[in-house]
Amino acid sequence: MNTQYHGEDFVAKRSRQLRKLAREHQDCLLFAADLAEIAERGDDEALAAGVERVRAYNDAELEAHLQHEEQTIFAPLIQEYGEHMDLCIALGKEHGYLRTLVEEMTPETARKHLADFARVLKSHTLVEEEKLFPLVDSLFTQEQLDKVMAFTPFRRQAPGADRAESRVDESGADAHRWLDSVERHRDGQDPHAGSVVLFPRYRPDLSTRLADRLGLAFFDFREEVMEALGTDAEYISLQQLSDSLRERAAEGGIVVHNIEALLCVKSEAERGEWLCAFLDQDWPNPVIVPISVYQSDVPEEHPRVCDLELMKMPRASSAEELPQENIDKYRLGSPG
């Protein structure tokens, strides 16, 4: 890795509560520069080593960094300073794209995927330093800043544990064991129970496969309910969320995708209270809610929770390219 970064000292510019994240941002830029060079000039051996470096970096630092920002910065900004929602949503989509690239990256795709990862990581990091963090320093209360500093990432297993096994081939028998696990969980539940399925990471393709396997309708809450409301979607109450789920469940069982798009604008206490209520009540038909980001708000050891954290999950079939305009919109110097 490069031994120094020739840009600004991010750490010196930040309040003490943001210095850990700012230090990690400097590491991000160093890492992105190394990856870009490997992608451009590396031979097959260097490219394969680059893929392993990305996976190790994700396990050791990146995933915790993304969780840190999502839970202590994006959520409060969206909830209390709605005029900055678009910035948080754009950055959140980039988080999802980086996670997808980590999952999809192979030695065969390394040159393209390493270049994409380096490009987005660099652009994303600079936008956060120049636009996001100044907002945090100017808007957050002392209590909110202290929560940023005190954050501990939510992990159910040691970093990297069973990672090699988790990348199973889609044609192998292991690729469907997670579905068997959820099906067994549902078989042990009352037909009118609501269930939460804890996914190790955000994977829309797995939610659709889960609906197909269980013979349930796929209900994308963000697309079907929130998008029509635009920025007013943040004002949907959790009672309205429950009413919407009950209305859809009256037509038949559902797998509810993207519920976290609404949960992210609610407080930790509100999320926890709603999840408890969701699990403890009965529904007209089965209602299954996948959760990947706010797992720490789900009641521990609840009988209606199916935890897939230690399951072997199939690799994503393809990476959905993040539209360049989503990045360009918040580049340095761009308006608004």
Image: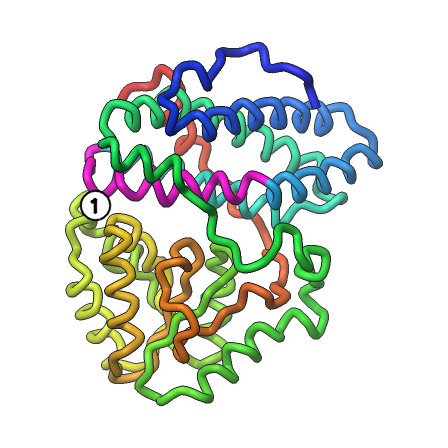
Q: Which residue is drawn at 70% across and 69% down?
A: 171
Image location (x, y in percent) of residue 196: 39, 70
Q: Is residue 266 above or below residue 187?
A: above
Q: What residue type is labelled 1?
A: Gly
What crowding class fits label 1: few (fewer than 14 Cα within 10 Å), some (14-19), or many (20 or more)? few
Q: In which quarter of the image is the C terminus?
A: top left
Image location (x, y in percent) of residue 294: 38, 56
Q: Which residue is drawn at 40% across and 31% down?
A: 325
- In this rendering, does residue 124 appear at all? no
The magenta-colored residue range is 61-83
Q: Which residue is drawn at 46% across and 80% down?
A: 214
Q: Report the residue marked by disc 1.
A: 230
Looking at the magenta stretch, what is its main secondary structure? helix
The picture quadrant where one finds residue 52 is: top right
Q: In this view, does 260 lie to the left or right of 168?
A: left
Q: In which quarter of the image is the N terminus?
A: top right
Q: In this view, does 175 lie to the left or right of 287?
A: right
